[in-house]
Amino acid sequence: MATLMVPENLVYERPRSFTDAPTHYCPGCTHGVAHRLIAEVLDEMGLAERTIGVAPVGCAVFAYNYFDTDFVEAAHGRAPAMATGIKRVLPDSIVFTYQGDGDLASIGMGEIVHAAARGENITVFFINNANYGMTGGQMAPTTLPGMKTTSSPDGRDVETQGYPIRMAEMLATLDGAAYVVRRSLHDPANIRKAKKAIRIAFEVQDRKLGFSMVELLSTCPSNWNLSPVESLKWLEEHMIPFFPLGDYKVAPAVAELKI
Ligand SMILES: Cc1ncc(C[n+]2csc(CCOP(=O)(O)OP(=O)(O)O)c2C)c(N)n1
């Protein structure tokens, strides 16, 4: 007797720009969401074959195992410098860095500021989870005032530990920056907006329009000592008021893109 085959709707497919390797991220960490969005956009734009990623030092240090593109590993904070060299030698490649807030806004502050000021035609994904995740949840330049971390156990005291740095706003002041925006990964609607920004950032680079950065507000349940669901809520209620979502720099040539 013939079996009736009912076609099923495809609801999930692993992006082709991913390898088969399972990721090592903690439950509820949004590094995996950020990876997936980047991989989906590379697939949709057909860019994987000529893409070179630059992995950071931090929780995403193994990014090179997860993306099925060429990848290099940078020393802590030096990803924009490496990306600069690669892009200048291979101007038709697509070069992106993927960096945490310790990596980009602390030890790598000099590299990111000058790469943006030079208008390097690279794309930066900045994962802001308000702490140093990999090393055990120490205070980062993006740790909120009053926020408890392993190195600010009584809460960040701005009198002695200074104020958090808003990287997107700061880099947007530089003439070399073409596209600098902040998005969040705390719910599906915002994840869709983040994906669109990632697409625009790659388009900016592909059309040689200059430096692009997408900051992604992200969770760190293990170091925040919250459940995955509580972390999403905490991000929305505490991080977004301090790090408002928005477009901080959209150069005229970028604004003309019909995406
Ligand atoms: C030169 C150097 N200094 C310090 C370290 C230790 N270290 C490893 S990861 C890290 C911070 C990572 O935090 P972040 O960039 O915010 O990324 P996350 O792990 O939160 O994704 C530090 C300080 C190092 N590996 N190399």
Image (cartoon, rainbow, N blue to C red):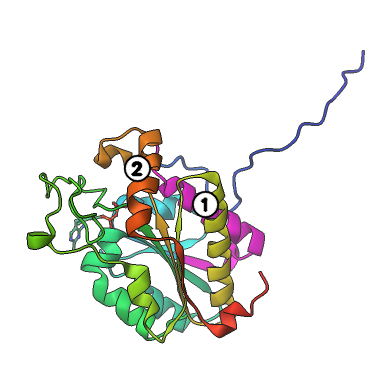
- What secondary structure characterizes most of the magenta part? helix
At label 2, the amino acid type is Trp
Residue 86 covered by magenta stretch? no
Q: Is mark 2 within 8 Å of ligand 1?
A: no
Q: Residue at x 23, y 55 (%)?
A: 143
Identified at 56% across, 49% down, the residue is: 189
Q: Residue at x 50, y 80 (%)?
A: 90
Q: Where, by quadrant of the figure, is residue 112 drawn?
A: bottom left
Asked whether residue 128 appears in the rendered view, the answer is no
Q: Nearer the viewer, residue 71 or 157?
A: 157
Q: Is residue 223 above or below residue 68?
A: above
Looking at the rendered structure, the number of numbered marks drawn on it comes to 2
Residue 140 pos. (x, y %): 21, 57
Q: Quadrant of residue 27?
A: top left
Quarter of the image that includes the N terminus: top right
Residue 161 in view in this figure? yes
Q: Please, what secondary structure does the residue beneath circle 2 have?
A: helix
- Is residue 192 or residue 242 the one in the foreground? 242
Q: Is residue 144 above or below residue 46?
A: above
Which residues are drawn in magenta?
A: 24-52
Q: Residue 124: x, y in percent? A: 42, 68
Q: Residues within 10 Å of mark 1 (few under 14, many from 20)?
A: some
> In which of the image's four quarters is ligand 1 placed?
bottom left
Q: Which residue is mark 2?
A: 234
Query: Which residue is farthest right?
Result: 1
User: In the rendered structure, does residue 36 fall within the stretch colored magenta?
Assistant: yes
Answer few, some or many: residues within 10 Å of disc 2's Cα (few below 14, many 20 plus, some between 14 and 19): some
Displayed quadrant of residue 258: bottom right
Q: Amino acid at mark 1?
A: Asn
- Residue position marked by numbered label 1 in the rendering: 190
| Residue 105 image point, x, y percent | 27, 66
Q: Is residue 220 left or right of residue 144?
A: right
